[in-house]
Image: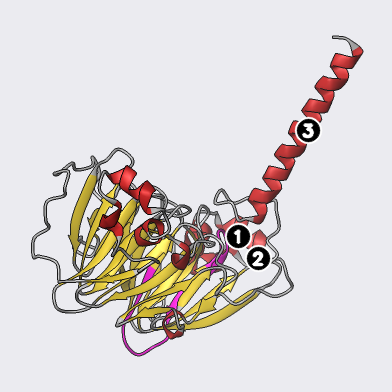
Amino acid sequence: MSNPQRREFLAAAAAIASLATLAGSQVAVAGDPSFMNNVPDPALSGKDLPTFKFALEKSAGKVIGNSYGKEATVTQLPISKGIAGVSMRLEPGAMREMHWHATAAEWAFVFEGRVRTTVVDPNGFAETNDFDPGDVWYFPRGHGHMLQCLGDKPCRFILIFDNGYFSEFGTFSITDWIGHIPKALLAKNFGVPESAFDNFPNDEVYFARGKPPPAEPSVPLQGWKLPPQTHRYRLLAQPPHGIFQGGREWRVDSSRFPIAKTITGVVLDLDPGALRTLHWHPNADEWQYVLDGTVSVTLFGSHGRTRIEQLQQGDVGYIPQGYGHSIENIGDKPARILIGFNSGIYETIDLSQWIAANPADVLATNFSQPPELFGKFPHRDVFVTGKDGPGK
């Protein structure tokens, strides 16, 4: 290689390396879901831990008629870079219009009323499903869908997205698109006269209103072309994943709901005084929504930093990946918490499990305590305790 060629080669290599470095730094700043733990997060690297609570149901949100959407993203809760959430209510006859999300997958839990959805995938397969309270859906990133209230009563559901920077109010809606395309282009695209679009909305509708949908889904224009994997999972219709002294847990990840590759969902019931014991999640952030009751959440962030928040019905809590935490029911009635993780595989390490996995002599040295003391600790993973602590 001649000297001029060698200089050109080295210059090109340096340019490529520079671009790669720049791209890597941009990914880190944006909150890459692969968790670049070598890059300090400014929201978490201060002397004190920031708030991890947001009163979602007390926020204004977007209200149209008697339907609304209220969101919790990094704008409302700066710590929540990995997951965003929305509380949505649809009145009878209302529909969250046909739309897609370019930057996030959508996971949902229905807790009031009934919902009908239709979703289309890149292969042209489409599925229509009806959802009851306790049911879950998952729509992969970029897949077009709509949400419709069924029956004569309102429906309510919580949406969880695997990107904290995602905004429900910055989504891609079909009326917004068609309303801003020249009619000549629309006519050419669909093979109909330009006049066919004279009465179409000029701007995004967001919540569409019409007649209540039929009891049974109507046949799509293309006929039924069902996808190989369903978008529906009946979470609370299943037996609990775990039954404990102080509560119950329902859990669904991609091992049970294969299409849900990026989000795991949990419904956790805690009896009065019960505790979801100290633990952390190695592979995911945790997003919490209190469906019922009042809980105290304790967050541990290294260097002696802890923060405690009380969450009531309608509040959101957020735990960054790898941070220690617990959830305690401090009310006088049962508490129910909906929990989402931005990973399709559930992983947890409990403090009781970690202690029990070590010999007494190791623990004695670590804590400068007599080894006999640790014989009194649980010899298993406790997960949830009753108000009086773990049973032996």
The span picked out in magenta is 319-338
- Note whether 344 is above or below 205 in the view shown: above
Question: Quick check: is 335 in the magenta stretch?
Answer: yes
Q: Locate residue 32, reporting x and y percent.
A: 59, 51
Do labels 2 and 1 touch, CB within 8 Å?
A: yes
According to the image, label 1 marks what residue? Answer: 363
- Residue occupying the point 56% across, 80% down: 308
- Note whether 301 is above or below 194 in the view shown: below
Q: Which is more toward the observer, 336 or 340?
A: 340
Separation of residues labelled 2 and 1 (CA atoms)? 6 Å
In the figure, is residue 29 to the left or right of 10? left
Q: Secondary structure at mark 2?
A: helix
According to the image, label 3 marks what residue? Answer: 15
Mark 3 vs mark 2: which is more N-terminal? 3
Number of labels in the image equals: 3
Residue type at mark 2 is Phe
- Residue occupying the point 25% across, 61% down: 235
- Note whether 19 is above or below 351 in the view shown: above
Residue type at mark 1 is Leu
Q: Secondary structure at mark 3?
A: helix
In the figure, is residue 245 to the left or right of 354? left
According to the image, label 2 marks what residue? Answer: 367
Q: Locate residue 254, reporting x and y percent.
A: 34, 48
Q: Which is more toward the observer, 186 or 77?
A: 186
Question: Quick check: is 165 in the magenta stretch?
Answer: no
